[in-house]
Amino acid sequence: MSVQPTRLVAALDLGSTKVAAVIAEVQGDQRSGSTRVLGVGVERCHGVRRGVVRGIEETTRAIAKAMKDAERMAGVEVGTVYVGIAGEHVAGQTSTGVVSVTGGEIRTGDVARVNDVAASVPLGRDHELLHAIPQDYRVDAQEGINEPIGMTGLRLDAQVYLVTVLSSVIQNLRKCVEGAGYHVAEFVLEPLAASLAVLTPDERELGCALVELGGGSTNVAIFQGGKIRDTRSLLISSGHVTNDIVHGLQVTQQDAERLKERFGAAWEMLVPESDVIELPSTPGQGARSAHRQVLAHIMRMRLQETFEFALDEVTRAGYHQRLPAGIVLTGGGAQAPGIVELAREVFAMPVRVGKTGQGLAGLTDSVESPRFAVLAGLALYGAKQLRQGASFGSGKRSSQAVEKYLQPVRQWFQDFF
Ligand SMILES: Nc1ncnc2c1ncn2[C@@H]1O[C@H](COP(=O)(O)OP(=O)(O)OP(=O)(O)O)[C@@H](O)[C@H]1O
Ligand SMILES: [Mg+2]
C-alpha cells in the first residue's frame, strides 16, 4: 500500500459498552491538513466501567479485536495508540503562578517559567498529571490576556487548568492496551478529544457545555474563551435509562437496549399516540405489547433527570447563564429522537447534537455518529501531535527511552486549539 507508516495515527475509546478503534492517515502540516479515516473497529465490551478496568482479560481481548478490525479495514498495521480517559477518578483544578519578568518584555522563556510555577503543585503519590492547560495571563494589572509574549511588564501571573488522574486507573488501562500488543502514545481527556471533533471555534470562544451521554457516565465539560474551563463526571447515564426500561416493561437488559435503540424517544410528544410495539416475552408472560409513548415516557423521565443534574453542575461551575452557544450533546444517548427538544426544555439554552466530521476525510461515515465523537477527536488530537512532530505517533513502536524523554514534554503546556 502507498501509505507511509510514519504518517499514521491510531486511537482507542474504551467505553463502558464498547471498545472502538480508529486508524487515520495524517495529511498536511501544522497550518493546515486533514485526517483521513482509513479504518474503524468496534467491539462490544463490558470490561471497562466508567473508565475503570473491571476485567483485564475481556478488555484486552476487545482491544485486540477492535484494533485488528481497524487494521484490516485500513490495510495497515500500527504500534502506538492515543487512548481516551474520563470518569470520577479524573479531576480538574485551576492553579496560579507568578514570576517577575527580567528585561521588561515578556519572552517565551518567561511564559514557560510561569506555567511551570503554576503547575508545580503537589499531586500526591497516587495521582499523575494528564494535562496542564494555560487559561489566562495577567501582566502587572492587566487581566484576561491570552498571549502575553512581546508585552511589556514587570510581573507575569498565569492561571493553568490541571487535569490529574488516579495512577492505578492509568496503569490498568495501559496493561490492557499493552496486553493487546500496542503501546500507549498518550492518554487524553475524553471531553477535550470530543471537543476537537464537534465544537466550532465560535462555540468554544463564546461559551458552551459539551454533554456526553455515555453508557456508564455523563460527562459535562465547559468551554469558553477558546479553552476548556471545567470538566465533571456524573454517575447517571444511558445505562440507567436501560435499567428503567427493564423494570418498567419487564424485559431483559438486552431487550431493553434493543427497544431503546429501535423504538425509543426522549420526548413522548414526538411519538404518535397510536404507535404500539410488541414486547419480547417469556412463555409464561404470553404475547405482550406496549404503547411506544410508554417507552418514551420512561426514557424521558430519566433523561430529564440527567439533564437537570448536568445543569446543576454547570451552575456549580459558575457558568449558569454564561454559555451563549448553549449545549452540544454527544455520546450514544444523543442518538435518541427528541433529545434536543428535551434538552432545550431543561437547559433553556440553544442545543444541538454534535456530529463528527470536521477536520476529517476518508471513511468519515464510519465515525459520524455522536457515539464516536471521542474516537474521532482522539484521532484529530493524535494527528495534531504528529504534525507538531511527536515521533511516537508513528506506525512504529517507540522505545522506552524515547517515551521517558518525552514524558516531561507531554506534561508541558498544551494549547488544544
Ligand atoms: N438511539 C438511541 N437512543 C437512546 N440511547 C441510545 C441510542 N443508541 C445508543 N444509545 C445508548 O448509548 C449508550 C452507549 O453510548 P456510548 O457508546 O457513548 O457509551 P460508552 O462510550 O460505551 O460509555 P462511557 O463513555 O459512559 O463509558 C448505551 O447505553 C445505548 O443504549
Ligand atoms: Mg464513551
Image (cartoon, rainbow, N blue to C red):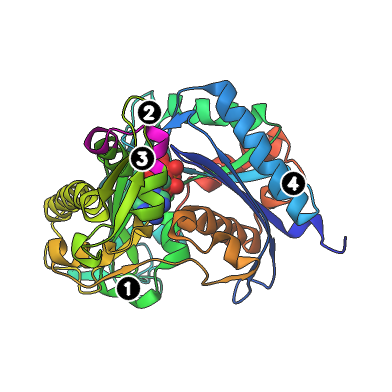
Q: In the rendered structure, which disc, 2 or 3, sits on the residue that comes first in sequence?
A: 3
User: Along the line of sight, which residue is nearer the eye, 85 or 65?
Assistant: 65
The residue tagged 1 is 203
Label 1 to label 2: alpha-carbon separation: 49 Å
Question: Mark 2 is on which residue type?
Answer: Thr
Which SS class for mark 1?
helix
Quarter residue 158 falls in: bottom left
* Magenta-colored span: 246-257
Label 2 to label 4: alpha-carbon separation: 47 Å
Q: In the rendered structure, which disc, 1 or 2, sits on the residue that comes first in sequence?
A: 1
Label 4 to label 3: alpha-carbon separation: 37 Å
Q: Is residue 253 magenta?
A: yes
**69 vs 105: above or below:** above
Question: Mark 1 is on which residue type?
Answer: Glu
Callout in the foreground (2, 3): 2
Residue 142 visible to an observer of this rendering: yes
Q: In the rendered structure, which disc, 3 or 1, sits on the residue that comes first in sequence?
A: 1
Q: In the rendered structure, which disc, 4 or 1, sits on the residue that comes first in sequence?
A: 4
Q: Assess mark 1: CB under 8 A from ligand 1?
A: no
The residue tagged 3 is 256
Question: Is residue 184 left or right of 239 when viewed as pictured?
Answer: right
